[in-house]
Image: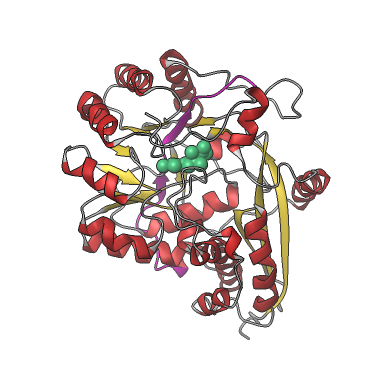
C-alpha cells in the first residue's frame, strides 16, 4: 500500500542559537541568533524537517503558510509556490534596495515568501524521502558526487562578546589582524580539513584586509582564497584591491554594492566577481548577466526558494556561462544537510560552498554533520538523513521564549552598539 502523504500537522519552532562575536561591515553578530525549525507530519506518521531564518518577518509568514499546508500532500512541491502567493506580506517588511544592513540583498515580498517556502519545501522533501525510502538527492535527480566541498569561512572576531552580555564562550580566540586570521585559518584546516578560505571583509580599512589575504596566501600557498566586504567599497577601491591582490584570489565577492557598481568593477578587472547580494532573486538575473556584472552567483536555497529553485538557478547560470556556488548565513545542521543534498546534484559546481556551520556550537540534531577534508559526505539515508533532537529543540526554543524580544531580530549594528554606543550602520561605500 502506498504511504498516505497528506500533511496532518505542521510545527513551527523559533529558536535562538549561540553565535560567536563575528565581525562584518554592519557590526558584530549577536550572542544568539534566531532560526526557525519547521516540522511537517504526514498521515502515515512521517515527519520531515526544514530550517530557515527566524526573525519575526519570516515567522509571521510561516504561520499562515503552515495553516495552508495542512491537508495537502508533501509530494505537491510545485503547489507550494501558489500557496506562498496566498500569504500576505506587510509592506513595512519589504525593501527593494540592495541593503547592506540586511546582508541578504533586496527584501521583496516574493523573496520573503521564498525564504519561508524553502523551509517547507525542504521539510516536505525530507518527509517524502523518508516515506519512499529515498535520500533527498535522489528526489532531485540523484547525486553526481559523493561529497560536497566547503570553504573555511574566516571572520575577524573578538575573543568574547562584550562583558556583561549573556553569551556562550567559544574557543576560537580573537582575530583582528593578519596573524589572527592566519591562525584561525590554521585551526579551520586542523579541525575540519578545509583547503579553501573565504575572509569576511568590510570590517577594517582595505589595506588591512589586503594584508590579511597576503598573509593567507603566504601561509597556504595554492589554496583558493576569497574576500567578501559585503559591498562596502567604492568602485575605485574595489579596483585598487583587485589590482593589488586579484592574482591571489579565486574571486572577489560583492566588492561594491549593486549591479551597476559591480558591472563597472567587472568591466575594468580580470578578477572574477561573485555575489550573494546583487543577484538574489530571479528578477535580478537579467540586468546582472546582460551587463556582465558577476561571474559567479552564490545561491542560498533559503532565499532562492528551496532546493529545486537552486537547480533552476544553476541551469540559468549554465546557460549564460556564469559559475554557481553557495552562500551561507548562520545556520544549523538541517540546512547544511539540505545544502549538501542539492549541491551533490549540480554537476557544474566548481567552487567550494560557504558554510557558517563550524561557528555554530549548538545544533538541533542528534548527531552533528562533520567535515572531512573540508567535505561533507552526501547522506544516502532516506530524506535528509538527519534526526531532530527534540530535547535540544525545546531547550533552544525556551531561550527564544525567555528573550525579551531584543534577540529575536538579527541586528548586528545593535550588537555593536553595546561595545560602541556611537555605532551606526556605516553608509556605503564605506571606503
Ligand atoms: O557572504 C555573505 O555575504 C554572508 O555570509 C552574509 C552574512 O550575513 C555574513 O556577513 C555574516 O554572517 O556576518
Ligand atoms: Mg557574500
User: Which one is nearer the viewer's eye here, 415 or 360?
Assistant: 415
Residue 200, given in percent of the width and then of the height, sits at 44, 32
User: Which one is nearer the viewer's eye here, 39 or 247?
Assistant: 247
Residue 154 painted magenta: yes
Q: Left or right: where does residue 12 sit relative to residue 193?
A: right
Q: Residue at x 23, y 32 (%)?
A: 239
Q: Is residue 75 above or below residue 91?
A: below
Q: Which residues are magenta?
A: 139-160
Q: Quadrant of residue 42?
A: bottom right
Q: Quadrant of the N terminus?
A: bottom right
Name the quadrant where ligand 2 sits: top left
Q: Residue at x 27, y 63 (%)?
A: 286
Q: Residue furthest top?
A: 179
Q: Residue at x 43, y 47 (%)?
A: 327
Residue 187 painted magenta: no
Number of labelled discs? 0
Q: Is residue 90 above or below residue 298?
A: below
Q: Quadrant of the C terminus?
A: top left
Q: Residue furthest bottom?
A: 1
Residue 158, given in percent of the width and then of the height, sits at 58, 21
**What type of secondary structure mainly makes up the magenta span?**
loop
User: Which one is nearer the viewer's eye here, 286 or 173?
Assistant: 286
Q: Is residue 30 above or below residue 279?
A: above
Q: Residue at x 79, y 50 (%)?
A: 394
Q: Left or right: where does residue 335 sit relative to residue 46?
A: left
Residue 84, given in percent of the width and then of the height, sits at 56, 73
Residue 382, given in percent of the width and then of the height, sits at 56, 63
Q: Quadrant of residue 127?
A: bottom right
- Would you say residue 355 is visible in this rendering? no
- Would you say residue 101 is visible in this rendering? yes
Amino acid at each position: 500500500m502506498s504511504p498516505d502523504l497528506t500533511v496532518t500537522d505542521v510545527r513551527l519552532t523559533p529558536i535562538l542559537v549561540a553565535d560567536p562575536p563575528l565581525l562584518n561591515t554592519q557590526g558584530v553578530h549577536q550572542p544568539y541568533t534566531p532560526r526557525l525549525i519547521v516540522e511537517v507530519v504526514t498521515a502515515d506518521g512521517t515527519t520531515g524537517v526544514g530550517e530557515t531564518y527566524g526573525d519575526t518577518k519570516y515567522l509571521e509568514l510561516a504561520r499562515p503558510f503552515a495553516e495552508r499546508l495542512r491537508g495537502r500532500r508533501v509530494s505537491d512541491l510545485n503547489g507550494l509556490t501558489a500557496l506562498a502567493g496566498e500569504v500576505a506580506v506587510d509592506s513595512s517588511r519589504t525593501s527593494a534596495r540592495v541593503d547592506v544592513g540586511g546582508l541578504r540583498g533586496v527584501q521583496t515580498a516574493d523573496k520573503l515568501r521564498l525564504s519561508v517556502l524553502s523551509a517547507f519545501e525542504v521539510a516536505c522533501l525530507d518527509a517524502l524521502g523518508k516515506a519512499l525510502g529515498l535520500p533527498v538527492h535522489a528526489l532531485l535527480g540523484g547525486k553526481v558526487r559523493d561529497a560536497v566541498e566547503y570553504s573555511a569561512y574566516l571572520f575577524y572576531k573578538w575573543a568574547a562578546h562584550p562583558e556583561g552580555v549573556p553569551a556562550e564562550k567559544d574557543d576560537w580566540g580573537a582575530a583582528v589582524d593578519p596573524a589572527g586570521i592566519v591562525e584561525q585559518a590554521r585551526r579551520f584546516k586542523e579541525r575540519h580539513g578545509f583547503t579553501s578560505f573565504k575572509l569576511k571583509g568590510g570590517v577594517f580599512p582595505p589595506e588591512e584586509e589586503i594584508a590579511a589575504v597576503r598573509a593567507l596566501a603566504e601561509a597556504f600557498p595554492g589554496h583558493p582564497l576569497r574576500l567578501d566586504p559585503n559591498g562596502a567599497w567604492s568602485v575605485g577601491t574595489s579596483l585598487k584591491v583587485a589590482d593589488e591582490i586579484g592574482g591571489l584570489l579565486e574571486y572577489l565577492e560583492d566588492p561594491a554594492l549593486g549591479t551597476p557598481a559591480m558591472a563597472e568593477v567587472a568591466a575594468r578587472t580580470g578578477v572574477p566577481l561573485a555575489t550573494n547580494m546583487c543577484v538574489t532573486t530571479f528578477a535580478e538575473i537579467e540586468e546582472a548577466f546582460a551587463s556582465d556584472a558577476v561571474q559567479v552567483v552564490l545561491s542560498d536555497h533559503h532565499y532562492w526558494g528551496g532546493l529545486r529553485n537552486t537547480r533552476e538557478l544553476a541551469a540559468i547560470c549554465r546557460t549564460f556561462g556564469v559559475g554557481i556556488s553557495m552562500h551561507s548565513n548562520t545556520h544549523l545542521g538541517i540546512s547544511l544537510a539540505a545544502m549538501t543534498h542539492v549541491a551533490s546534484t549540480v554537476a557544474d559546481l566548481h567552487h567550494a560552498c560557504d558554510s557558517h556551520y563550524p561557528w555554530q556550537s549548538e545544533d538541533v540534531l542528534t548527531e552533528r554533520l562533520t567535515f572531512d577534508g573540508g567535505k561533507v559526505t552526501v547522506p544516502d539515508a532516506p530524506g535528509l538523513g538527519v534526526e531532530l533532537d527534540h530535547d535540544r529543540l525545546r531547550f533552544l526554543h525556551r531561550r527564544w521564549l525567555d528573550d525579551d524580544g531584543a534577540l529575536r531580530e538579527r541586528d548586528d549594528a545593535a550588537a555593536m552598539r553595546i561595545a560602541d554606543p556611537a555605532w551606526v550602520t556605516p553608509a556605503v561605500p564605506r571606503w
